[in-house]
Structures are given as structure tokens and as C-alpha cells.
Amino acid sequence: MNLLEITNLSLSIHALKILRDVTLSVAPGEIVAVTGESGSGKSLTALATMQLLPKGAELSGHIMLGDQDLTELTEAQLCEIRGNDVGMVFQEPMTALNPVQTIGAQVAETIRVHHRDVSRQEAEARAAETLARVGLPQDRFPLSRYPHELSGGQRQRVVIAMAIALRPRLLIADEPTTALDVTTQAQILALLKKLAQEDGMGLLMITHDLAVVADMADRIIVMRHGEVVEQGETRSLLQNMRHPYTKMLFEASGHRVSLPEPPPPQPLLEVRNVIRDYRLPRTSLFGHPGHFRAVNDVSFTIQRGERLGLVGESGCGKSTLTRALLGLEQVQGGSITLNGAPVFSGTRPNLDVRRQMQVVFQDPFGSFNPRHRVDRLITEPFHLLHDPPQGADRTRAIDEALTAVGLTHKDASKYIHEFSGGQRQRIAIARALIIRPELILFDEAVSALDVSVRAQILDLLADLCGAYDLTYLFISHDLSVVRTVTDRVLVMKSGEIVEQGQTEDVFERPAHTYTQSLIAAAPVLPQFEQARA
Amino acid sequence: MLRYTIKRLISLFISLAVASIVIFAVIEIAPGDPASFMLGMNAQPETLAALRAELGLDVPKVQRYLTWVGGMLSGDFGTSYTYRTPVMDMISDRLWVSLPLALYALVLSTALAFPAGIYAASRRGQAGDIGVMGATQLGVAVPNFWFAMMLVLIFAINLRWFAAGGFVGWDKGLWAGLHALTLPAIALALPQAAILARVMRSSLLDVLGEDFMRTARAKGLTARQALWRHGLRNALIPVLTIIGLQFSFLLAGSIIIEQVFYLPGLGRLVFQSISARDLIVVESVVMLLVFSVITVNFLVDLAYAAVDPRLRSRT
Amino acid sequence: MIRNLIIGGVLSAVFVCAALISFVWTPYDHAALDIANKLKTPNALHLLGTDHFGRDILSMIMVGARTSIAVALVAVGIGMGLGVPLGLWAAARQGTWLDELIMRGNDLVFAFPSLVIAILITAIFGAGAINAIIAIGIFNIPVFARITRGAALSLWRREFILAARVAGKSAARISVEHILPNVTNLLIVQGTIQFSLGILAEAGLSYVGLGAQPPTPSWGRMLADAQTLVSIAPHMALVPGFAIILTVLGLNLMGDGLRDYLDPRLRVARV
């Protein structure tokens, strides 16, 4: 008999249809992955299983946990089940914990809320045991720690400890590693797998990343627009994809583009021994303020026409380096020159240099002033020109930039909220292209996009490389993306470049141990021989 | 925690120093010489000079400022121009009316606002919430001194439960004193309670939307348990700020309310002193009010750290 | 909550209209004494009754609305005019000594409640409507500086500001072009709230004699006159009291309604 059996689950919130006829099951000890892009309803399927839906939600169908139908239980009965029979882990470890309570108290609470006869000491002892089980031993992570004293990965371990403290039969994990770095992600995935095996616990994993679950899940369920489009045993599903959406998703996840050959090397941007220090708050009242070296002695060159990648995990200094390259912040040592001219002259950014550089940011929603129209948004870099185009010239420039990124001149008079995330990223690229810069910085420019949209933007990038002879620096934590859109790559760790070389060489034969661990941790899609239909 | 306290303490002293300079400077630019005001138009130059010397008005400003501050630190606020008695004595009697009144009102306001805010937040969008929010909307709009007049009309004149005004003094016992301050305290507290209840509600609603509240529910806590165990303490942080601000409003408001109830508090003293141009008394009372406000805000800062462990370790 | 906006708007409009009409017409001369008709309760001749000198209360309320609205409006103007630029400036120079100076200055002003400022000013320059405006206005400065800085700081962290910096725009230009338009909604809402607080503060100051001086009528002083007569002529206290309550209530409801109406997140939810 199955542990969890969802049949014909439909859900609407304020008359908006979210889920339609979702049917899926999880057997004891089985790992089932639900995957799909944003808006597929995968997360709400998880919340529906917990019966923790927002107000105004209407549900039909059945959610059987063992022999109990969760849709028919009272709130009091559901509280008995949550945390006891079913545990849940969430996406954002930074906000999932109560900031004003110790981790010990929060883990012990799971135990005490379900077993009122357990004494405080006993609950704490069991909390300590559980924390040790998830890799937070007492000698290094005492119960008295507060969440803000832990890293993201450690916090996620605390959340997992809270969820499994009572050894539930089913664990639901909603994008448990999306907010984490690849190396941490690999550790958390391994932990979840180990826990499921040891306790014979069913695990329902929600993820947008097919690669994350491909080598872990027993079965995969693919969702789109609130419906299950395909499900099956992992290997057979990947070998024999029936639904075109699954095929598209699979193709987009490992999407490769082909770049034109770069021209012969001729240095464009030269970075020499750059150092960037931040002042830390004083540690003692009258002591000297300390320094944090975010970028330490970094040197590299970007050749004209070259596509250079920069990879590293969060906090490695890649964002700081980006701001220094753009001349937004002063560096404490070394030099950054473009065509021989410094990006920062004296104490002010050098505008002559800056008009040769543009940037595309990560967040498609925060990158634009919501009160301006697209034509005004994309012409903002004209501010850098001595003699910006006016009238018909300006209109022509706008049309050209929009057309180049696959939009039309009609879009110029719209506001940014009328566009989807992918279209916004296109507009961001148009804004960068409009003054024909020598160099474009892509700062995690495709990281917030769904895989299918990401594939389209990568295609656009490859096209633009052919049409405009782009030179760019592509900064990302996503190794598979960097691998396909760059010629050469830099690997950054703790403010230093630990390895650099031709992209294929570095990925095939990483020399530095850190690069090796990064590549080993990065989830990859298995390449099965596709069965003939 | 110690570092945090020291930092706040330094900031407290700087604020007090700057505030005293501002008050001194403002009073200094006041047109008119207290000595000639006291002696009238026809005073002889010699008597004027003698009085100026006696009042300490003939020395340089910086020295006068230092004497004033030094005096205050040792509990000597100078001598009233009008009554020729130590300002300290005049203030201390009246402080024992104004300060208890403000504190009484603060306790009432908090005691009313917390349950109302929590109740409304836990019944968001339902009849109870709408009722409480409507009442607070009205409470915010009512001027406290008008409300005080209505209380007098109903409870003192018609029902005769309380005296219409005056203060019996604390030597008649704690109960008699509190009884006399009850109507003024209610009048002061109710509009502030309405504001505080609204802040409490919206702060709680913000917290209820946080991820960790969902985590708490996933552990098996009921909505109610999650609210009490995880929501309340996090919601308290913005509420504390408002309580700190309210103390200063209550203290200032008590000056007005004292007029309605004929209470012999600081308010009465200030208005008498203004009309008599007894600037040294005005100066001292204002400094005292500002001192209380800054000190209460310092205590609120310490309360933050007690509530929020992030503050304790960050600095 | 479009309902709040309408009710609040109508209530506020009634008092603004009453104030405006009073410039050209009032039922009686608000200052005309008519001892024979003193302390009349509301009747057909005097819709809101008369006071202890036989003056028509409706006329006094209309002219008093003028004082209240003028004082509160100018005080909000002072608060916005100085507070908003200070807040923008502090946010643009976040973390520098200038930011620190502006914010500590704000804290200092917060330590002087408007009544204390009024007492200080009155002690020096004497009582009057102008001094009441200054006292309330000074207290409004840190309120606007603080909320402007808070909102501006979160905007400065957004990527579109970074994009404007990459386009070479100066901090001052970014503040005016990108930050200010995105904090206007907030300022409008806070403006109505401070406006209503200004009306309350003006009433309080005139009640204790620190506000508008006779013969200028004001709601606060009408209440001060009513105090000793409250048991024999309650309408003298009730009418100005309700005038204050309804105006303040109207402005607050309007502020709440505007906040909901202008909040894009809520607007999406409504659609």
C-alpha cells in the first residue's frame, strides 16, 4: 500500500484554477520528485499535502496518508499529523527559522508539541541527537546557537532536523537546495537521501531543476500549468520521454549553444593585482576597525571578441569584482584599464571608459524603474554620451536595439510590468546594447529564469555574438551555463582567482582541488540512449 | 551585549549634551532681559545690575551654560526669577504628579492595546477585526483633552464616581492618589492605545506572513500556538519603538490634560512660568522633559537587544 | 478598501468646503455678540446653537476650520519641504558621517515633542498661530526625513538604481529621477496622516492658549471656553469636539484608503 496517495486533486484560490486533477503517489522509502517550471503548481501541491494552503483555497479530490484522507480531517487532527507523520522542509533557509529563538528550542519544540509528557531536558537531549544526525554535532553547534550565527546550509540542516525529529513517515522538501551553493546543495541532497533510507521514510521532493533529482529520485513527476503531464520511474522516463513538454524541459536543462570563433587575441580589459577591502565594524570599542578583503590580488585580461566566464559560489567576491570593473567602487590596490584607460580616475569613475561598458543584472523584476516606459528605460545609457541621438535617430536606435533582442518597436511605449521575466531580460540586454559598448558584463543574467526561458536567452546571446562581435564577461554560479556560453573561464574562491583556462579544458581537466569539487558537486543530467518511439 | 549597552550609553550622553545646548541657546535668544522684566520699567540701573549679578546674568554665556549644566548634574536647577525659591523644589513636587500620570497612562495604554491588537490580528478580516479597527480609527481621531472633558461630564458631574479635578496628594495613600489620577490617565491613554493597537496588529500580520510561521505550522503547532510562541516576540520589535515614542507624547500630553483636571503638575508650572517670563523654570522643565524622553528611548534600545539576539551579537 | 477612500474623502471635503465658504459667507458674523441669545442649544435659527456670548457656533466652526486646516497644511509643507530632501540626501550618502548627522539630528528633534517645542517658542516669542505652525512643522521634519530615508534605502539596493549608476548618473540626479517618484505614494499617505495629527496638535495648542489668539476663532479655544460650562451647555463642547473628530477621522480614512489604492501589490490583488 502506498504511503501517500493523491487522487484527482484540484485546487483553486479565489476562483483562480491552480491545480487540475493531480494524481500521484509515494510509497514508503521511495523518493519521488515533482518537477516543472514556475506556475506549474508544484509547490502548492506540497502545501496542499500539508493542508497549509492560503486563505480562499478550494480543494477537491483526495489526499490519502495511509488510511486517512487529509482533506477530511479537522484542523486539530491535522496538527497531530504535521510534524509527527509528515515533516516539511522549505526553500529559504535564511527565513524559515525564527530569528529570536535558539536552534535547540526550535528543534525541541517539534518534540514537545506532540509529546506533552516529555520533559524539557529529555526534549533537548533528543533535539541534540537529531541535530547530530543532520550533521550539526553538539561540540560545534550547541543548542544555544541562534539562526543568524549559522550559514545557509547549516540553517537548512536545522530545518531538516525540525522536520525529522519525530521520524515522520513522509518528508516533503520544497526546493530544499535552490537557495544554496552547489557544494552545499550536494551535501544537503546526500543528507536527505541518507535520512530517507535510514528511516524508510517517503520523500516528496519539489524542484525546478531536473538535474538535481535525476540521480536521486526513484520516480519523477513532470507538471505544467497545474497538471501532471508525465510520470514514471526515473530511468525509463528519461529514456523514453513521451510528452513534448518533458522533452523540451530536458533539452532546455542541458541546452548548448555554439559560439562563433573568437578573433585573434588583442587585449581589451586588463585587470592587474586588484584588491578590494571593506571596513568591518570595530571589534573593540577603541580598537582599529578590521578589514575584509573581498577581492585579493586578482589579475586577468579579456581579449577583444572573447567570451570570458567567472564562476564561484556566493560570497567569493564575484559581485564585488563586478562593481569594481564597472567603476562603481574604488579599489584599494591594482589597476583596471579598458583599452589602456583606467575605469576609475582619481576619486571619480572615468566616464570615457564607462561608456564602453554595460551590464545586465540578475533580477528581471528589480532592474527597471517601474514608472518609466521601455523607450526611456533602454535609452538611459545615452546619458553617458556627449552627443546622444535625438528625434528620429533616437527612435531608430530604440527600434534597432529592441529588434536585436527579439522584441518590436511597439514595445517601446509599454511599461515594464507588461512583460514576462524572459522579456525583461531581453529589454535589459537591449539597454546594454544601445550604446554599442566594447564590453558587456552579465551578472547572473540568466539565473532567475525558468530553464526554457533561459535556453532562449542563451540562444539570443549566441546570435548576438555573431551579429555584434560581442565581448563579454559572464558571471554565474551555474557551471553548465558558463560551460556553453564562454571561451575561457576564471574560477574564483575567497576573493582569489584559483584557476583559469580554456573553458573545455577547465571542465574536462580541472587542476585546482576547489574546481574539482565544484564540478563534482554540480548536478548533471544523465545522458541515456533515447528509445526509439 | 555590554558593547551594545556602552554604545547606546555614549549616544545617550551625546543626545543629552546637544539637547541642553539647544535649549540653552534657544532661551538665550529670547528677547528681553529677565532682570528688567522682574523689576519693571522704572528700575534703577544700579538695582538692575545688582539683580543681574545675583541671578548670574552678568557672566559670559559659555560660563553660564557650564554653571547651568553643572548645577543640574548636582541637582541644583537654579533659583526661580519670580518666586526666588530653588527651581528644584518647585519641580520635584510637581514631578510627582506628572510622572506617575504619564506612567499610569502608559500602563493603561499597553494593557488595552496588546489584547486588542492580538485579537484583531488573529481574526484578520472577520467581524472582530473590523470592529476593533473601527474603534481604533475613532480612538486615534479623538483629541485627548476633549475626551477628558467628556469623562468629567459623565463620571464626575453626572455619576459622581470621581472628583472633577484637583489632586489629593500621595500622603493620603497610594489608592487615593491613583483614584484621583484615573480619569486623566484614561483620557491620555485611550487615543494612544488606539495607535498602539493598530501598530501591534499590523506588526503581527507582517510576522504572520513570514516563512518561519509556516515552518512552525509544519511542525504541528496550531495557528494559535504559532502566534503566541513565534509571532508575538518578533512582532514586539516595532511595537517597542512606538511605546518609546508614546512615552514622550504622554508626558507632553499630560501637560494639557493637567489643565482639564486642574492638576498641580509640570504643565501648570510651565504655563505660569511662561506668563511670568520665569525663563529659568521653563528651561529646566523643558530639559527635564527631554531628559525623560531620551532616557526612555535608551531603555527601549536596551529592550530591543533583550528581544532580538541579532542585536546582541552584531555590535 | 475603496470605501475608506470615499468616506474619508467626503468627510475631509466637507470641512475643506466649510473653510472655503467661510471666506465669502457664514450664517452669522462669527464674532458678533448677542448676549440675549446666549447658550442656545441647536435650533432652527442657530443650527449648532450659540456660545456663552451668543455667538453662532456654526459660523465659528466654519471659520475655525480655516485656522485648523491652514496650520496643519503649512506644517505638513514645512515637514515635507525640509524632511524629504534630508531623507533623500541621507539615503544617497548612506553610512557616511552625513547620514549619521542627519539621523542623529532627527532623533534629537524627536526628543522634543511638538508641545515642548511650542512651549519653548511661546516662551520666547509669545503665543500665536505662526508659532504653532513652526512648532508642529519642526516636529514633522524628522517624520518625513525618516520615512523617506527608509524607503529610499531599500530602493538604492535595487538593480535599476545600479543600472542608472552604470549609466553615469550622479546620486543627486538618481534621487530626483528614480527615487523620488517611487516614494511619492508613501509621502502622500504619510502627508494625510501628518495633516490629521497637525489638526489635533493645533487644537491642543490653542486649547492651552499657545495657538491662534483671539479674535481668530479656533476649535481648540472654543473647547477651552466650553470647559467651565460643560455641565450646563454640553453642546458647546460637543460641537467643536465632533468637528475635530470627524475631520481627523476623515483624513485618516483617506490616508488608509490611499495606501491601499496606491499599493501596486494590492491593486494586482483587486484585479
Image (cartoon, rainbow, N blue to C red):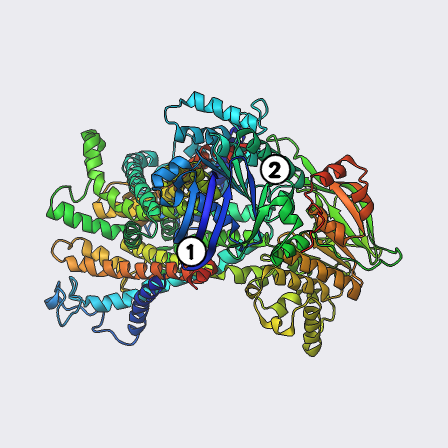
Q: How many marks?
A: 2
Q: Determine the residue positioned at 61% across, 46% down.
A: C96
Q: Amino acid at mark 1?
A: Ile
Q: Quadrant of residue A311?
A: top right
Is residue A406 depicted above or below C172 in this figure? below
Image mark for residue A189: 2
Q: Picture coordinates of residue B161 (x, y %)?
A: 13, 41
Residue that protrudes farthest toward the bottom in the picture = A392
Question: Pointer 1 indicates a residue of which chain?
Answer: A
**Gap between marks 2 and 1, in whole Å?**
32 Å
Q: Name the element at disc 1.
A: strand
In the structure shown, which secondary structural element does the residue marked by tag 2 occupy?
Answer: helix
- Marked residue nearer the N-terminal end (2 or 1): 1
Label drawn at residue A13: 1
Establish if A16 lies above or below B294.
below
In the rendered image, residue A390, in percent from the top left (x then y), is placed at 69, 75
